[in-house]
């Protein structure tokens, strides 16, 4: 079974009275709360579909968010264009050898989610946001290097700072950095510490802040 991407939790708990309202200041993870004032890296959250590119040391395969998830045909065609060729196979061999690697990214664009046409009105694409080698997520520098090697887009960094500053940023309804429609409001941000960290339960420290939670 191909490893899936970890579920990214929101930073605050929700009210259990039926409103499901986000309770600002009621931190979901005590480790995140403890580290909230450190510098976190904020990247744009894209409203698309999760994509996994798996290199097993000999060949590649594609997957959606889960093994049962299906991907739109235009997106599969775009992934084949990017990865199912001799040049890309040689690049995987050169960069990773026989190590197992998963490139995690987002498929986005035309007819993918309600706002897909505002990202790309006449096509679809793949944008990289994480690289897993074995059981280790790689630092941002490696993610950017891998994206450059394969000619891929990489999810943009939109800020660095404490988590409550990231909340303020999202509340300002900033515009997407990757959408062709420059008026599209960013869905939100995904935040992670500058250095890869895990909590006492071994869970990766990575959180999301979505604009619609504050409307």
Image (cartoon, grey):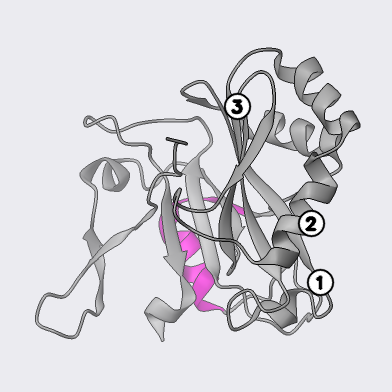
Any part of residue 110 in sight: yes
Nearer to us in this view, 73 or 107: 73
Q: Residue at the location (61% across, 23% down)? A: 56
Is there CB contact under 8 Å for labels 1 and 2? yes
What is the quadrant of the C terminus in the image? Answer: bottom left
Residue at image mark 3? 101
Question: What span is colored magenta in the figure?
Answer: 159-172
Position in image of residue 138 (x %, y %): 58, 28
Residue at image mark 2? 78
Left or right of 46, for residue 163: left
Is there CB contact under 8 Å for labels 2 and 3? no
Left or right of 142, for residue 182: right
Any part of residue 152 in sight: no
Residue at image mark 1? 123
Marks 1/2: CA distance? 9 Å
Does 163 appear in magenta? yes
Position in image of residue 175 (x %, y %): 68, 76
Does 19 appear in magenta? no
Marks 2/3: CA distance? 20 Å
Q: Residue at the location (28% across, 62% down)? A: 12
């Amino acid at each position: 079974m191909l490893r899936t991407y970890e579920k990214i939790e929101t930073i605050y708990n929700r009210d259990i009275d039926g409103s499901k309202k986000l309770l600002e200041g009621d931190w979901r993870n005590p480790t995140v709360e403890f580290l909230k004032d450190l510098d976190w890296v904020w990247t744009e959250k894209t409203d698309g579909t999760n994509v996994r590119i798996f290199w097993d040391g000999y060949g590649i395969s594609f997957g959606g968010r889960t093994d049962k998830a299906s991907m739109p045909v235009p997106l599969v065609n775009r992934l084949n264009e990017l990865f199912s060729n001799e040049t890309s196979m040689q690049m995987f061999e050169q960069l990773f050898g026989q190590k197992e690697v998963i490139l995690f990214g987002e498929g986005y664009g035309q007819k993918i989610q309600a706002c897909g046409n505002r990202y790309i009105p006449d096509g679809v694409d793949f944008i990289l946001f994480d690289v897993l080698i074995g059981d280790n997520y790689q630092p941002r520098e490696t993610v950017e290097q891998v994206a450059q090697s394969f000619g891929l887009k990489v999810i943009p960094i939109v800020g660095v700072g404490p988590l409550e500053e990231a909340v303020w940023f999202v509340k300002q309804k900033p515009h997407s950095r990757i959408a062709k429609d420059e008026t599209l409001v960013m869905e939100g941000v995904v935040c992670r510490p500058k250095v890869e960290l895990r909590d006492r339960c071994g869970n990766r420290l990575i959180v999301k802040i979505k604009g619609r939670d504050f409307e």
